[in-house]
Image (cartoon, helix red, strand yellow):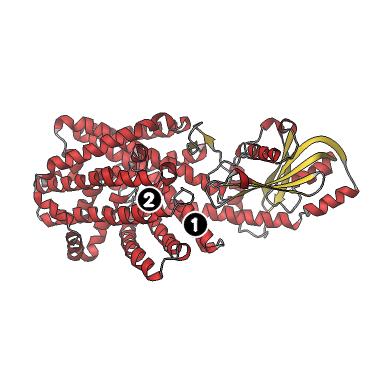
Amino acid sequence: MLGSIGVVYGDIGTSPLYALRESLHGAGWDGRDGSEVVGIVSLLLWTLVLIVTVKYVLLIMRADNRGEGGTLSLVALVQQALKRRPGWLIAIGVVGISLFFGDAMITPAMSVLSAVEGMAIVAPSFAPYVVPATLGIIIGLFLFQAQGTERVSILFGPIMVVWFLTMAALGLYHLGDNSEILIALNPLHAFQFLGRHGLGSFLVLGSVFLAVTGGEALYADMGHFGRRPIRIAWAILVFPALAISYLGQGAFVLNHPEAVTDPFFLMAPPSLLLPLVVLATAATVIASQAVISGAFSMMQQAVQMGLLPRLEIRHTSETQHGQIYMPKVNAILLTAVICLVIAFGSSTRLASAYGIAVTGDMVITSILAFVLFSRAWKWPLPVVIAVIVPILTVELMFLAANMMKLHDGGYVPVAIATSMCILIWSWVRGTRHVKKKAADSAISLVKLIAMLTKSQPMSVPGTAVFLTQDPDTAPSALLHNIKHNRVLHSQNFIVTVMVANTPTVSDEKKITMERLSDRFIRIIMTFGYMETPNVPKALSLARKRGEKFDIMTTSFFLNRRTFRSARNQGLPFWQERLFIGLSKSAADATAFYCLPSNRVVEMGQQMAI
């Protein structure tokens, strides 16, 4: 539970820094009408209740894939229920992870900026240094990723507990400023606010949604901590602290309208303002760390599912399986966050870009949940409609409200998600095209074995492992070895690595073996989408099943394809160039499959696409 408070609730826990402030700015509050503040605080509170408590804590967290959560886990569950993998389902999953990647860029910029801006209240002369200080903290945070978060993660929980208790204490301290704020607990005031403002309330809704950014982390990080600790932490600490903070800020603003510029920091007594800024900065760094780690996990899943080329994955912990570091992803995120901080310069301006990605991701989650509840869980359709449609309606309203900020900065997450979708689409389409071209000139593995029994090349001792994507056709590396080296090992494993739609696969189901002849064995290895495809480790399972071979004298043969452009071969020219570029950026197969580098033989092949 302590760990979940530190990691899961980092993002949503720092929302009080800016959510009420930006909502009041969006409403254009002039300090005269107190019912405006009451209505906005009511909207903030009941958005937390509906989106986080009802949707995620009570409903969505029940949909776990062997303990794992997140958009791709939900896609896998729906796929199991439908017993097929329709194109629309993959498209929804791709849009979901693309939006999450956009959120992973905006969250560190927004959170750290909003905290460091508190220093300008402590010392107004610090204002010109807000952006440089923010950049320094962000660069340090991303450079630290290579070391792994295990060393500091033990501090995350206690720091965030202190943060939530501090928020609650400040809120309680100011609740007495104006007890009228307590009527915001009645949702009627939220509806009255929307009724008074009509279409104009959409501007406010876009800012109100800032209160629940990070809510999707409850589901995405469920595999790390479990459903029960996350639910308990929300009920006994996180939600009460958030609610009291918003109520306290509302009461404070009603009594001190001039504090609307930054109600959170101005609530603190002057003597405690500096420690509060330091604590807020620590909390925002933790929030950023959580979303960066989530981006690494999400990209790993996308690679395992074949949606992206192989990316280098480094494990930074000997005890925690989920602690990974992806250098290229880290560099992309760092570059994007730096650009966002420099381009926008303040959390108020950046708030316009915040929200679209998260709202879109939540809408996708609700659509997938609708299919899952009705098709897999067999809920009666009227019940599913009664539960999901109200939530989906509210989320679509928030999405529409955030889309109104498109020209002010909302185009940033849309552009990021669109670019990501194009990359994934191009990679998936290009991969299919390459497989089709390879299959046109391929030789059946069974047919090759029959040919080799009639005309055997020179036999050499030892075991050769040939990795191939298609277990039914002869691997190109095997054909090249026979054609150019004119040798055949005494034992040959034809290995295909596949990814299951479950996060992990047990050792009993990890490999299936089929002996094709006295020299050839076909092995299908199946890994979960959260696992590292460690081929040598999986091969040790074959020894346990009676296959005799010495792993120390085993050679691994890989086929390294390079592509050259060929006009009118099936792909548009721009997509062809993009696919070739992505293939060149792919990580080395030796490292990706955890092969011993001193026993790997690569056979080159050039293909025109």
Q: Between marks 2 and 1, how big is the CA–CA gap?
A: 17 Å
Position in image of residue 445 (x %, y %): 78, 52
- Residue 341 can be seen, yes or no: no
Q: Position of residue 166 (x, y in %)?
A: 22, 37
Q: Amino acid at mark 2?
A: Glu
Quarter of the image with the N terminus is: top left
Q: Residue at x 60, y 57 (%)?
A: 429
Residue 125 found in image quarter: top left
Toward which corner of the image does residue 311 lie, by quadrant? Answer: top right
**Quick one: label 2, few (<14), some, or many (20+) residues within 10 Å?**
many
Is residue 306 left or right of 449 when viewed as pictured? left
Q: Callout 2: helix, strand or loop? A: loop
Residue type at mark 1 is Leu
Please, what secondary structure does the residue beneath circle 1 have?
Answer: helix
Residue at image coords 36%, 67% = 383
Specify whether residue 237 is in view.
Answer: yes
Q: Nearer the viewer, residue 360 or 161?
A: 161
324 to the left or right of 476: left
Mark 1 burial class by Cα count in 10 Å: few <14, some 14-19, many 20+:
many
Q: Position of residue 510 (x, y in %)?
A: 62, 45
**Residue 499 image offset from top left, x and y in percent:** 59, 49
The C terminus - image quarter: bottom right
Residue matched to label 1? 77
Circle 2/circle 1 CB separation < 8 Å: no
Name the residue: 37% across, 56% down: 59
**Which residue has dot 2 on it?**
216
Q: Earlier in the sequence, mark 2 or mark 1?
A: 1
